[in-house]
């Protein structure tokens, strides 16, 4: 049963995922840019796998290619899953 | 004028510890890093060298290569690094197998959870050139950079190729060596299935009781530089790659030629390349795997290549102290050889006790002993032979 999608739960999932991928938790915020966090295309593919495991939502490379901040990633997942 | 190739930095991760120093010091003291039948690098923690993210993005063999390169480049260039244009520095790193742990982990994910569970990092982690790529990226090296794959000869082939690249004028320096971390379920079972590894779990090269090799893991990295450039920048020179010989048995997938014809030819080629003769050899760092076949055919090959000199020169195997590091072996052993020459000492074949008929060279039993040859620069041969019949032999010299 996929986890219920709320902005809060998605934020938690994305934050936990980014920490798992090696990002420092103290640097995370909705405004933080992926570039500043050194999150690249390979990280985003892994993050998409985590999101799919948790919410059953499939994110493709094209979906995330314009995304610049952590907040935009969260909003995208919420919108896709909503 | 022939360009000469000197060694200005060495770094190692081995079962004897992290660093070239514990490798040579502990081996010379007759210690062994083998435990429970394996040569694991128990003291190596990748987080001592890499961020959490970098650790996730590299297989263990790459992590070890990065650590060894850090040490070697630190020794060669200090804080400022090497003073060469990045495009004039290469990176050639051998491996026997590559990122097998990553392959096995993703195979498990594929079977258990399907295609979508396979990591996008699987390919860059397991590819055999991953160590060369990671070291080049970390140190901004833009010259010749690639992996070398020739089983247990890969580390020596890498160093030989690197020396050729410098000699040909294609680079001022090359960061080179080998790395291997394949102590996984599949690799351990596979080597055991072909009866290559030791059922007793004891590495005792050239001893009558030897029953196979002990698998190990680790990395060895050297910084090679063109001699005049190195001298010009005031680098401390540790040794020299004097010569390189490479041949192939073309005989059997795994077994060496019993008469060691092509192995002997590789030794002679390395000496010819160095402009030296058998009488100039002061020490032999043998491939000495502890398998019944290798140690016999290698002894035959050394007698054929060195003639009477074979009986006078100390011959010892680093694998007696750390096991067989496969694609890293030739590089780690080249480092051990240069460091032994610098100390003017032949380290022992640890655990050697029982002679076998025909295996009658001086295998340096018991403890390390001085290399007797006045005060002049010392010369050694380092043998590496791999499954597939690959033979790579380095002729190494210590700095005067």
Image (spheres, coloured by chain):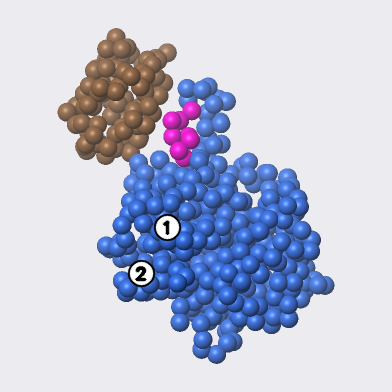
Chain colours: A brown, B blue
Q: How far across and down, in percent of the image, does residue B245 sit?
A: 61, 64
Q: Which is more toward the observer, B207 or B150?
A: B150
Name the residue located 27 percent from the left edge and 17 percent from the top edge: A76
**What residue is drawn where x is 69% and y is 65%?**
B265
The answer to which of B168 and B316 lies nearer the viewer is B168
User: Which residue is rendered at x = 25% and y = 22% of the image?
Assistant: A66
* Label 1 Cα neighbours within 10 Å, binned few <14 / some 14-19 / many ≥20: some
Label 2, secondary structure: give it.
helix
Residue at far bottom of view: B374
- Residue B217: x percent and y percent? 55, 54
Q: Tell me where residue B199 sits by quadrant.
A: bottom right
Disc sitting over residue B170 in the figure: 1
Taking the magenta stretch, the answer to whether it contains residue B120 is: yes
Indicate whether residue B232 is drawn in magenta.
no
Secondary structure of the residue carrying tag 1 is: loop
Q: Is residue B59 above or below residue A54?
A: below
- Tell me the residue that label 2 is attached to: B229
At which x and y percent is residue B144? 43, 51
Give the image location of residue B214, x and y in percent. 65, 57
Tag 1 or tag 2, which sits nearer the N-term?
Answer: 1
Q: Is residue B35 above or below residue B75?
A: above
Front in this rendered view, residue A7 or B378: B378
Decide which of B34, B155 is in the foreground and name it. B155
- Marks 2, 1: nearer the viewer: 1
Does the rendering let one see residue B47? no
Magenta residues, start to end: B118-125
**Quadrant where the C terminus of chain B lies?**
bottom left
């Amino acid at each position: 049963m996929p986890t219920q999608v709320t902005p809060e739960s998605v934020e938690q999932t994305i934050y936990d995922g980014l920490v798992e991928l090696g990002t420092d938790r103290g640097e995370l915020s909705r405004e933080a840019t992926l570039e500043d966090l050194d999150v690249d295309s390979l990280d985003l593919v892994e993050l998409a796998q985590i999101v799919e495991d948790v919410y059953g939502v499939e994110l493709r490379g094209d979906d995330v290619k314009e995304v610049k901040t952590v907040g935009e990633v969260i909003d995208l997942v919420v919108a896709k899953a909503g | 004028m022939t360009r000469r190739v000197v060694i200005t930095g060495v770094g190692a991760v081995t079962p004897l510890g992290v660093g070239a120093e514990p490798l040579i010091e502990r081996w010379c003291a007759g210690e062994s890093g083998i435990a429970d039948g394996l040569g694991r690098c128990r003291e190596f923690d990748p987080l001592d060298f890499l961020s959490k993210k970098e650790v996730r993005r590299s297989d263990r063999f790459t992590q070890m290569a990065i650590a060894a390169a850090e040490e070697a480049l630190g020794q060669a260039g200090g804080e400022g690094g090497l003073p060469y244009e990045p495009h004039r520095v290469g990176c050639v790193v051998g491996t026997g197998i590559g990122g097998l742990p990553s392959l096995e982990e993703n195979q498990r994910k594929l079977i258990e959870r399907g295609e979508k569970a396979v990591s996008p990092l699987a390919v860059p982690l397991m590819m055999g050139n991953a160590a060369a790529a990671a070291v080049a990226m970390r140190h901004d090296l833009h010259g010749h950079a690639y992996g070398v794959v020739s089983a247990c000869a890969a580390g020596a082939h890498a160093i030989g190729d690197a020396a050729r690249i410098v000699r040909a004028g294609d680079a001022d320096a090359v960061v080179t060596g080998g790395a291997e971390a394949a102590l996984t379920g599949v690799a351990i079972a596979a080597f055991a299935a072909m009866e290559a590894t030791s059922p007793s779990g004891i590495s005792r090269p050239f001893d009558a009781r030897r029953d196979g090799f002990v698998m190990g893991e680790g990395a060895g990295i050297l910084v090679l530089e063109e001699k005049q450039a190195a001298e010009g920048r005031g680098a401390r020179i540790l040794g020299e790659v004097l010569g390189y010989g490479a041949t192939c048995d073309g005989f059997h997938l795994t077994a060496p030629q019993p008469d060691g014809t092509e192995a002997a030819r590789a030794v002679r080629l390395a000496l010819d390349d160095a402009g030296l003769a058998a009488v100039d050899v002061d020490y032999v760092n043998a491939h000495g795997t502890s398998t019944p076949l290798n140690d016999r055919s290698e002894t035959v090959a050394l007698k054929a290549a060195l003639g009477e000199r074979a009986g006078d020169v100390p011959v010892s195997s680093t694998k007696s102290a750390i096991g067989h590091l496969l694609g890293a072996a030739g590089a780690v052993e080249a480092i051990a050889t240069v460091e032994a020459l610098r100390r003017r000492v032949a380290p022992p074949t640890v655990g050697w006790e029982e002679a076998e008929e025909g295996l009658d060279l001086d295998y340096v039993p018991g403890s390390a002993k001085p290399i007797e040859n006045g005060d002049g620069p010392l010369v050694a041969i380092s043998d590496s032979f791999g499954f597939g019949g690959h033979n790579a032999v380095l002729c190494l010299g210590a700095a005067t």
